[in-house]
Image (tube, helix red, strand yellow):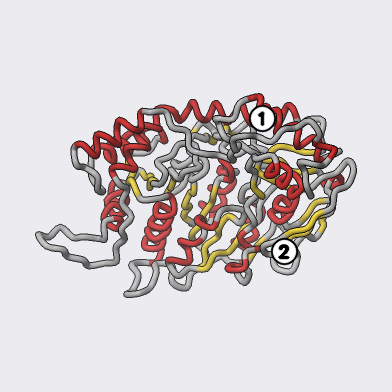
């Protein structure tokens, strides 16, 4: 379909400069700290920038210790490795600390949340999503413990910067003596009952990837209140070097430490974190207000318990307003119908006018690499029950949100005028 020639979109001009989903926002302070690292020759994995980032972010999030790492995935990997060691003991040579053990994981997330379980030779068991926050469903988690009472580790991701139902999830985990790895990669600055995400789990990780709320182009942090855990992660991330005059290695290590140059970029970004959150919140509220006349809803959160960082603004189309749409593994097909639309139609229209959107994260249990892993819904069902209707709603909630939802352009450099055009494009998709 040629949206530029579609009469529904007459009068809308294509953006000269692309409107991004969520791109880095630089302020100039970053250059100061990067230049200092270069001028003082501290360009490797030690230096004042790393020290400052660890101290500043530990204070902001409300933990005692932060360890700067190369990315959020490395932080998650070492958090999961540490949890496995605490639960099951040190790994034997060439084996992960989760060898032969299952781990309950958020189903709707990026695979960086899940892959570290495989790195440590564990098996992810995917826990379905719930509609209230689009995060791990406590009822499904409870069912999972009934089915697999031996599980002692839960990995939860806060989707798109919105905290999950942590009171309920922590209560369930406590009842079953299970540890929590909190993936706060997308939710830095979001709070649950006044507490920062990244400080709620037993082991916590955040990300400074290029599209995050603040960025170093890369980088991440492991966050903890345990000095022992922080020192362990610091050792593992520097190839597990022992305190000897030579290179002495007594366990497997990783080249996961943050660069002092990357840390310089992060250091320059930190003072602007709350400003970025406010800008993202304004974008979300503008979408919510201007799309109220359409059969859509914005990504939800518990207004009484949590404040998101509004990293990405998303919408979900009402069931009775969904136009026909099917997806294969790497392709899709949809049909336009008056008064209705579909995620792919809206995404294609945005692309035609030079704006970037994205489908909702495809649930992990639907990914080819993880299709044989267990998957648990709130009713206790899993495989073979995809999209089964129960009481007017889909039992497989994650698959339903993926089917009807999409991420909207959420770049905090987007002007109100540009956002108005995007809102107009979305409206015209329903004509």
Residue at 74 percent of width and 53 percent of height:
403
Q: Nearer the viewer, residue 236 or 339?
A: 339
Residue projecting furthest to the left: 245
Within 10 angstroms of label 1, few (less than 14), some, or many (20 or more) residues?
some
In the drawing, what numbered circle is on residue 317?
A: none
The reply, left or right, for residue 33 in relation to residue 281 is left
The reply, left or right, for residue 4 in relation to residue 305 is right
Write down the quadrant of residue 311 in the picture. top right
Q: Nearer the viewer, residue 383 or 46?
A: 46
The residue labelled by disc 2 is 328
Query: If the image is split into quadrants, where does the C terminus sit?
Result: top right
Q: Report x, y in % for residue 68.
A: 33, 46
Q: Report x, y in % for residue 380.
A: 70, 62
The residue labelled by disc 1 is 419
Within 10 angstroms of label 2, few (less than 14), some, or many (20 or more) residues?
few
Q: Report x, y in % for residue 430.
A: 83, 39
Mark 1 element type:
helix
Q: CA distance from mark 1 to mark 2?
A: 31 Å
């Amino acid at each position: 379909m040629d949206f530029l020639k579609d009469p529904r979109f007459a009068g809308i001009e294509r953006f000269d400069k692309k409107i991004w989903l969520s791109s880095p926002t630089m302020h100039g302070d970053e250059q100061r700290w990067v230049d200092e690292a270069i001028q003082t020759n501290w360009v490797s994995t030690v230096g004042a920038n790393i020290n400052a980032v660890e101290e500043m972010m530990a204070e902001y999030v409300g933990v005692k210790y932060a360890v700067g790492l190369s990315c959020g995935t490395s932080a998650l990997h070492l958090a999961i490795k540490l949890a496995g060691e605490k639960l099951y003991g040190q790994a034997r040579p060439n084996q992960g600390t989760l060898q032969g053990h299952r781990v309950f994981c958020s189903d709707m997330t990026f695979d960086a949340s899940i892959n570290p379980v495989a790195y440590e030779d564990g098996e992810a068991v995917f826990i379905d999503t719930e509609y209230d926050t689009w995060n791990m469903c406590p009822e499904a988690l409870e069912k999972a413990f009934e089915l697999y009472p031996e599980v002692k580790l839960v990995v939860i991701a806060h989707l798109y910067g919105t905290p999950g139902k942590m009171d309920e999830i922590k209560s369930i985990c406590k009842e079953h003596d299970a540890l929590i790895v909190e993936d706060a990669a997308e939710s830095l600055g979001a709070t649950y009952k006044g507490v920062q995400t990244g400080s709620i789990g037993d082991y916590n990780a955040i990300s400074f990837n290029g599209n995050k709320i603040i960025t170093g182009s890369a980088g991440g942090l492991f966050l903890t209140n345990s000095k022992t855990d922080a020192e362990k992660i610091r050792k593992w991330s520097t190839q597990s070097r022992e305190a000897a005059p030579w290179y002495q290695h007594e366990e497997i290590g990783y080249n996961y430490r943050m660069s002092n140059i990357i840390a310089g970029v992060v250091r320059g970004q930190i003072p602007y974190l709350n400003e970025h959150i406010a800008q993202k919140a304004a974008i979300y509220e503008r979408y919510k207000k201007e799309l109220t006349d359409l059969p859509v809803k914005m990504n939800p959160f518990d207004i009484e318990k949590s404040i998101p960082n509004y990293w990405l603004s998303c919408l979900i189309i009402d069931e009775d307003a969904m136009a026909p749409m099917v997806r294969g593994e790497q392709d899709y097909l949809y049909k336009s119908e008056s008064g209705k639309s579909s995620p792919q139609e809206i995404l294609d229209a945005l692309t035609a006018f030079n704006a970037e959107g994205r489908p909702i994260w495809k649930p992990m249990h639907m990914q080819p690499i993880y299709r044989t892993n267990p998957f648990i819904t709130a009713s206790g069902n899993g495989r073979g029950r995809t999209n089964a209707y129960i009481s007017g709603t889909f039992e497989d909630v994650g698959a339903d949100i993926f089917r009807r939802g999409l991420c909207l352009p959420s770049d905090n450099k987007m002007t109100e005028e540009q956002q108005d055009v995007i809102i107009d494009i979305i409206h015209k998709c329903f004509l």
